[in-house]
Image (cartoon, helix red, strand yellow):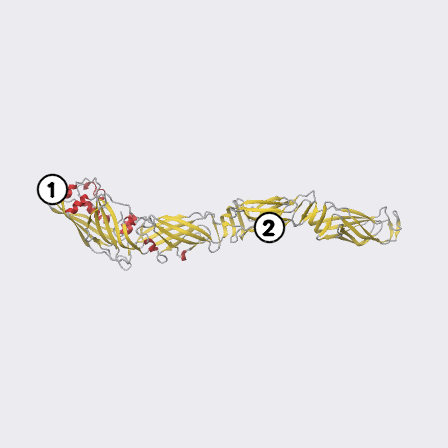
Amino acid sequence: MYEIGGILFVITILDVHRRKKHFYTEYCYGQGSENVNRLRFLTISTISVLLSWQCIDPPAEPIIPTWDVDVSLPLINRQYMLEELVEKNPELLSIDENGMLIYSFSDTMQNDPFGDLIRLHPEPADFSFGIGVFTLSPPEVDFTVEVGPYPGLQPGYEGTSPGVPPVPVSGTLPPVDSMTYMIVESGFAGLGLFNESGVPVELPGGVTITNSDDGTVVGHFIFNDVIDPGEYVESFVNFEDTRVNRDLEYDFTFSSPPDDDVTIPDEPVLAFNLHFDELYVSEAEAQIPGQTLQTSYEGEVVIDDSTYVTEVLFSQGILELQMRNLGNINVPVTVTFPELRPRNNPSQEYSISRTLPRGSINTYTIDIQHMMIHNTTLKNSLTYIIRLGTIEGTNDYRVVRSTDAISGEVKASEPPYDELVVERIEGIIPPTRYDISEHVTLDIGDPADMFEGDVRFNDVQLNLGLFLDGGFDAIANLSIVGENKDGVRDSLEIPVGQRHFSVGEWTSIVFDKSNSPIDDFLSTFVPHFPEDLYVTGNLMVNPDYEDGYIDVNNTLTTSVQLNVPFDFGIQDGLVRDTLSIGDGDDGLDGDMFDYFNYGHMYFETDNGIPLEMDMRINLLDDQDVVMRQFPITGEPAIGIKAAPVDSSGRVTGTAGRDVRVLNLSREDIRLVRDADKTELLLFINTNDDNETVVFNSQNSIRLKIYATFNITADFN
């Protein structure tokens, strides 16, 4: 049962379930009380709420007279202090430095982990590039051009030569094997000439090589000096976007200056050798030799347009790489993602090597569940590099162009995997909403079990503690919602100035009367205090778009502490409690009540607690029907004056000595005999309906209670 000695309302909250049934027989009188009549039970029931901090001291044994006499029965003479209430409820009550009583409740709860809230949405990245120039090495072409016999100079002649005038010479070269045509982007060709004519040779216009089909010039080879018999000379031309066909023709002018000593061979000819060196070809129809292609391509896929990272660990997601080879040769490729690393080997760049068949479309997937992104600087993209490898030579003729495209795209797979789920991220993330829903069961009792009335709180304080173990600050858009068993709900919004909190440290958000209607919030629920408290809303993580980190295991830890100083007002408060009269096995003879004629109960008080108390008692039968009320209706209740207080509501002294008397008639005593229980009604108010008062641990009430009875003794 709640202790009434001054702070009945809050005391009611502390222990609404304690009852002191069998109070007299077991707690106070023991087995030696068998001859005490049931009026004592009424007496003790009447004062038990006032005295329940401690059991009543055993009364002195009355002297049984042999005639009608008045007997005085002392019951209690003691001072009760509110400090004793704290000692009995240390888990809920405390005393501050000024002696004020503080009711406190606290609890800590942890929200669900941050989880896979961070998801990246890569933007598809298209790419297309040609395989680039490639090399061809056509074989050398050897051919001879007859330039004799000369006039007057027959084969075998030795002597003086008068010279040979200019003679135009043209013809067709042997076919250039292994190709139909080629367009040479860069490289050179050499034309070697061995003079086997027997006479000095001049080629005043050089040698022109042309394509047979259209006469386009392949190269113009210049020989400026006189070429002596038996001498070998070379001339070179550089190719630049030059088309060279399989079938070629030559054209030049031959002449010979006079010479005093010549020997004419049997077959006077000029022997030519056409050879190609370091050819880089942009297009050809040819047998393509095996070679390593030198082309590479570098691109980026934006992993999220508003997220910049140095490190990301993924728990789910698939990157899809599609590559098309529209050319006419098989092309090996190696695709490297420099910032994408295996989680178990962060120093190793991730790469994939495949051969793309000619004219093919190829799709490859990269499961990044066990991958991570590692950047040296903040980036919002993922680099990929495509390098072409070594192609195999072809025996057949293929048309190959440097513009033959390797194309495709890098993207996240189609739904449901079109996003990359983050396990941990370091960098800058956009402001991200993190929903909160926490529940606390408030074990603070229910005053309605024994209390009716209005309560005005003066200085309630609710502390909401927030601790986010991630690496970003946040803004708490949260509400505190209370609900009692009748479904009454009320809420508090976090004060605007306290919504921003820093990561990695506890932030205390204080609700008090300076920034919120916290006092009215708690009063809303009276007489049923809230049983449930909810912390709902969301956190806006990284509202300032700054560098930090967070992962799936980061959590928000929330603490709630409710402090209710004993500084409040009570208006028209009513505390009810029901007490049993005996337990049916007390051994008392009901006829003994016939010996009582009448009696008086004296209540002497000196109240130092700032509560006014009016007490009435109902006698109840076994059906809880009221048989009689004491004092009877129309008579004033047994009143206890409140202690005086100053302007701050603090007690300044006691109410002074006050004595009240309750008369008991013979009929009253007989009703006690028939009653099964007593119902105690305590009407309480603070001094001023418009103000609150402060309850101090040193506040106390002095009670002196005793009774006198007129008894007729009957020894027969």
The amino acid type of the residue labelled 2 equals Phe
**SS state under label 2:** strand
Q: Is residue 271 visible?
A: yes
Residue at image mark 2: 127
Residue 171 is marked as none
How far, Cα to Cα, is label 2 from label 1?
119 Å
N-terminal label among 2 and 1 = 2
Rendering coords of residue 670 (x, y %): 16, 45
**SS state under label 1:** loop
Rendering coords of residue 371 (x, y %): 53, 46
Q: Nearer the viewer, residue 698 or 337?
A: 337
Residue at image mark 1: 714
Relative placement, left or right, of 559 versus 404 is left
State which quadrant residue 647 falls in: bottom left
User: From the viewer's perspective, is residue 646 above or below residue 341?
Assistant: below
The amino acid type of the residue labelled 1 equals Asp
Q: Is residue 709 visible?
A: no
Rendering coords of residue 220 (x, y %): 76, 53
